Amino acid sequence: MRKELRQGEEMNRRSVYEGLTTGTFEKSAAGLGENQIWQCAYSDRPQMQEQDYGTIFSLLVLQGIVNRRQPVFYFDHQTYFGKIDYFGNDSPKCTEEFRRFYADTRTFEFLPVKSAAETLKTFVPALNGVILYNEEDMNSVVAAINLASLYDCVPVAQNTYRREYAKLGWKIVGEVDLSEKSLREAYEWMFENILPHCNKNGAYAMGYRYFRSDKKVYPKFYIMGLDYAVLRKNFVFLLSCNERERGFYDYVICGDKEEFSVYEQLLDKLEAPAAMQGWIDPEWRWALTATQHGHFIYCTDWAPNLSFHASVPPLNPPPYEVNRNRKPVKLENKVYISVLANEGDTPKMVAQLYNNGWLDPRRGEYPVNWTINPTHAEHFPSLLEYYVLTAKENDFFSLCPNGAGYNVVRENDRLEEFLEYTRKVNKNLNFRTADLWYANMEKVRQYFRLMPEIKGISIEPHFEVPEGQVFSVDGKTVVRHIDRLYYWYNKGDLCTNCKIDKEKLTQFLNGYYSADKPAFVPIYGFESDLVGEWAQFCDTLDKDKFVLVDMETFFDLASQVAKPFRYDLPEPAVEHEFTDRSLFDKTAWFAYDGKAEFEWVKEGLKVRIPADAEKKSAGFRNDILSSTAQEGQCSAMVAIRGVRLPEKANVLTVTTSYMSEGSDWMFWTYGDYDGFSLTDKWEPFWKLSWAGSRSEEVPGRVRKHYPKAHNLLILCVEGKPGDEIVFSELKFTES
C-alpha cells in the first residue's frame, strides 16, 4: 500500500489509497467509553511550547477526523488572542466554561493527557495509518494534510516519524514529496487528484508567506480551526491572495501573478457561496478576492474546538428563539442608544465567548446586541444553543455584518446567491436587524428586497452622510454609524486601555440630545473587555435623556422619524484632471484635518505635523494611524478634492524624497459614485517606513465611476509634532 509520491512519477491517487475505508473510527478503538472525551493541551503559539508546527498539524487533523461522527477529542486551549496570558501559563476561561457546560448537560467525562505523543500513540493505531511528508516543502505539507483528511490518516513529518515513532509499527500509507515541482505544478496535481474528492462548499487558508526587513521569507500560519476544515473535508491551501507584494502591519506579504492565478483557479473550482475559512492578510484583499468569486470569509482562526462543537448534538435543534425578552418602548425626545458587539461574523467570537466577555458578572444589566452569524446554527448548533440557554434578560442578538459571512457587498456580482443562502440560514434565528458594510444604494435596496424579514440596518460611516442620520430606503430604516463610536474601543479620547473616559463620553453623547426631537446613536465595536466598564458608565447616564435599547426596538422607534433618503451634496466648483503636475497645483490641496501644515518646495509638497497636533492611540486605521504608529503619535492629512483619473489609469504611485526619522505615511481615497456608497478605499499601506515610492492598484469599479468632483485623494503623515515628509511625485499609470 505504501508508495512515495515524487516528481517524475505518475502520481495516481487511486493507486496509492485504493481500498482505504473512511469514517469508521469508534471511541472503543482508542479505549474510550461512550461519554468519555480525550482532552489534550494546545497552543496557537507553538514556539512557547515544546511542540512544533508539524505536531500541531498532526493533532488538528487527528481531531477533525475522530470528531466526525461523535465528540471525542477536545483541546484545552492556550492562546495569545484577547486579554489572556500571552505565554500560555493559564488556559483561557472559554475552554473551562464549555467543558463545564458539556459535562453538566451531556454528562461528558474529560480525560486530560499531558503530551501530544501520548495522543498520537493512542489514536493513530485506530485510524488507517500515517502519511509522511517532506517538512521542508510547504506544498508537500499541504498535500499530506489534504490526503490525510480524505483517508482518515495522520500527517507526520518524515524526520519526526523516524526520530520518534518509527519503532511503533504504524502503517505508512504514503510519503508525499512535491519539492521538485513548482507551486503551480503541485497545486495542479492537487486540483486533479485531491480537490474533486473534497467538500467544495468551503476551503481553508492555512496562512501565507511574508518577509521582514531581513528579506527572508517565512510562513505565517493561521491554523486554529484546521480541525473543522478536516471534519468537513474542505480543501486546505497555502496561497497568497496578492498578485504582487503588499505591505501590511510591520511586514511585507509575498505575492506574484503566478501564485495569485493559482489561488483564483481554486476559487473558481469551489461551489459558491463557499465559506473561506482560516485567514490571509491583507484583510481587504482576502475579502475582496473571495467576494469577486462569489464566496465569503468565515474566519476560523482563534476558534478552538470547532470540530468538537460541531459533533455535539444539540439538546434541541434549531430554530432557536432569540430576543424574546424585548419590551415595548414609547418614542420620546431622548437619545436612544443601541450597542453592537463586533466580529460576530466569525466563529472565533462564539468559540472564545466573545473573548471571555460573556462571562463578565455585569453582563446582562444593560441591553447589548451580540452580533452573530446565523451560519453558526447550521455548523455548530450546540455552540449557539449555549448562548440561547445562558443569555440574560438584556442580552440580545443581531445579524452580523453583511449576512452569512464577511464579503465586500458592493463588489459582489453574485449578491443574490449570497443573500439567498443568508436567508436560508437566518431561519434558524430569525434576525430582523442587520449591520451592513461596503454597500451602495443599489445593494442596500437589493439587501432589503432579498431579505424582507429585515426591518432595519446600520451602515458604516460615510463621510458625505451626516452622522446619526436616520432615513428610509424603500420603506425600510437605515441608520449611519457615528465615526467616534464606530470601533469606539480604539478611539483614544473616549476609551483607552479598557477604560472608558466617562466624562468625555457623556459630553459627546450630550451633543445628540435635544428636547425637541429624538436622536438615534448606534455604537459599534463593543469589546468584551468593556462589559463591566460599560455597565459602570451606564450607571451614570441621565435616564431622562438617554435610553438603552435592543436593536429591534431601536429600529422600531427610528422608523417613526425616518425620512426618505435624498442625496443633494453640492458639487465643488473646481475639478482636477489628475496629471503628473497635480502635486504642484496650489489650488488643489487643503488641510483635510484642519491642522496640517503644508507648503510647496522645490522638491514637491511638504506636509508637516503641527506643534499643537492632537495625540492619538496607535494601531487602528479608523484613527487615521497605521499599525506601525507608536502610542501618542500624531497625524496630519492633506487632500485634493474632485480628482478625475486619467483614462485607463489603474495604478497610483506616490513617491517621497524626504521623511523625518521615525515618521510614516500612507495614502488612500474616498469615492462616492452613485450618491450613497460607503467609504471606498484601495488598500493603504501598513508596513515599515521608508522613503521612496509606494504603489497601489485602483479598483476597476472606482475607475468606472470616479469622475465625480467630490472624490478625495488623501495623503497622511504620522509621527510626532514637527515631523514632515516631502511628497515629490503622484502618478497614475496603466499597469
Image (tube, rainbow, N blue to C red):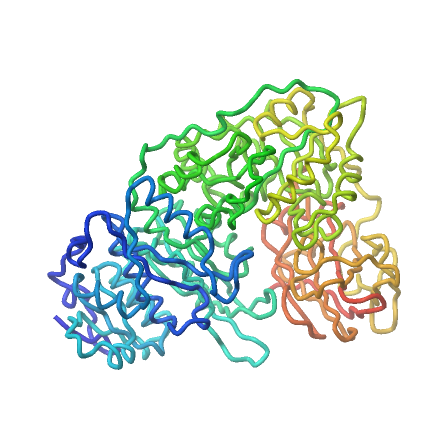
Q: Is residue 219 visible?
A: yes
Q: Is residue 659 above or below residue 205?
A: below
Please state, as top left, top right, bottom left or bottom right, where the C terminus lies in the image: bottom right
Residue 238 figure quarter: bottom left
Apparent side of residue 8 relative to residue 52 in the rendered image (left or right):
left
**Residue beneath the point at 19% across and 53% down:** 27
Q: Is residue 7 above or below residue 434?
A: below
**Residue beneath the point at 25% across and 77% down:** 161
In the image, residue 529 lies at what x, y percent? Answer: 59, 49
In the image, residue 110 lies at what x, y percent? Answer: 30, 53
In the image, residue 657 lies at what x, y percent? Answer: 77, 75
Q: Is residue 523 above or below residue 610?
A: above
In the image, residue 689 lies at what x, y percent? Answer: 68, 72
Q: Is residue 449 visible?
A: no
Apparent side of residue 114 relative to residue 551 in the rendered image (left or right):
left
Query: Of 436 and 345, which appears nearest the observer?
Result: 345
Please state, as top left, top right, bottom left or bottom right, where the N terminus lies in the image: bottom left
Apparent side of residue 380 relative to residue 413 in the rendered image (left or right):
left
Tag count: 0
Residue 337 figure quarter: top right
